[in-house]
Image (tube, rainbow, N blue to C red):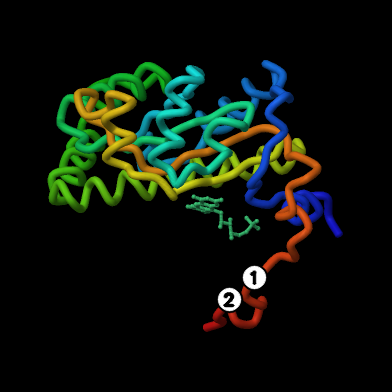
Amino acid sequence: MSSTLENLNWRYATKRYDATRKLPKETLDLLMEAMRLAPSSFGFQPYKFIHVTNPAIREQLKAVAWNQAQFTDASDLFVLCTIKKMDDAYVNRFAEETIKAQGTTAEAFEPYRQMLLGSIHSRSDEEQEHWNACQTYIALGIALATAAEHRIDATPMEGFDKDKFDEILGLTPLGLHARVSLALGYRSPEDKAQKYPKVRLSKEELFIER
Ligand SMILES: Cc1cc2nc3c(=O)[nH]c(=O)nc-3n(C[C@H](O)[C@H](O)[C@H](O)COP(=O)(O)O)c2cc1C
């Protein structure tokens, strides 16, 4: 088996963490960098990642997340949030950054900027929020795969009250909405879930040839 598949079989959605073990800073930095490098449609990155380091806030989040212990016991907790609405200013800033990074000119970039504006205008607010959320999950997937590669335990979590998370984390005034959480750390040897066999569709059922 390739090491990629070994790592993906090794990982599981960790239920119980060893609360005494902390990720080294370099490991945390690596995981955050992997999330930063995630691809997104047009490269818009319509999200923010809240690294929740305050233990009291983590307790508050757990209370509105079915008391899932990962919210307090994992070494690190991120709440991945979607930008609710990208407006013209957002696109213009993105255009400026791209022009700077890629050494092109505003003039040469203009038709593309118009296309980007057209793309965001063509979506209703609801459609855009959904589209932005889809991008957020790509970063989640990259983080999960990177964590597995480095044998760091992780849990993706949607089992929480998103509106309450918005309130606790003060997200609404920032134009953000909590979408999915990510716990990172080290599994407890007592976590029974690490022994559960994987439940997945067979290759034949999952893939369709045309
Ligand atoms: C978007 C998403 C949300 C999830 N929410 C939770 C959650 O709130 N709590 C939890 O313990 N596991 C959660 N899971 C973990 C899944 O239940 C788990 O990934 C799935 O059952 C497959 O098992 P495995 O990841 O251990 O291989 C979530 C997974 C994803 C991808």
Is there any visible trace of residue 46 in the rendered image? no
Q: Which residue sits at x=21%, y=42%? A: 115
Using the image as rendered, state which of residue 22 and residue 204 is in the foreground.
22
Q: Residue at x 21, y 35 (%)?
A: 86
Neighbour tally class for label 1: few under 14, some 14-19, many 20 plus, Cα within 10 Å: few
- Provide residue 170's location: percent of width, then percent of height: 27, 24
Q: Which mark is residue 102?
A: none
- Amino acid type of disc 1? Arg
- The label number, if any, that marks residue 206 in the structure image: 2
Q: Is mark 1 within 8 Å of ligand 1?
A: yes
* Residue drawn at x 74%, y 62% as measured from the top left: 196
Question: Which amino acid does the dot numbered 2 rest on?
Answer: Leu
As measured in the structure, the alpha-carbon distance from the residue carrying label 1 to the one carrying label 2 is: 9 Å
User: Image quadrant of ligand 1?
Assistant: bottom right
Residue that mark 1 sits on = 200
| Viewer-closest of 15 and 13 | 15
On the rendered structure, is 113 left or right of 205?
Answer: left
Q: Are marks 1 and 2 in contact (CB under 8 Å)?
A: yes
- The tally of labels here is 2
> Circle 1 sits in a helix, a strand or a loop, which is it?
loop
Instruction: Residue at 72%, 33% (x, y): give it.
Output: 18
Secondary-structure class at tag 2: helix
The quadrant of the rendering that contains the N terminus is bottom right
Q: Earlier in the sequence, mark 1 or mark 2?
A: 1
| 135 up-or-down from 198: above or below | above
Please give left or right for residue 23 compared with residue 80 in the image.
Answer: right
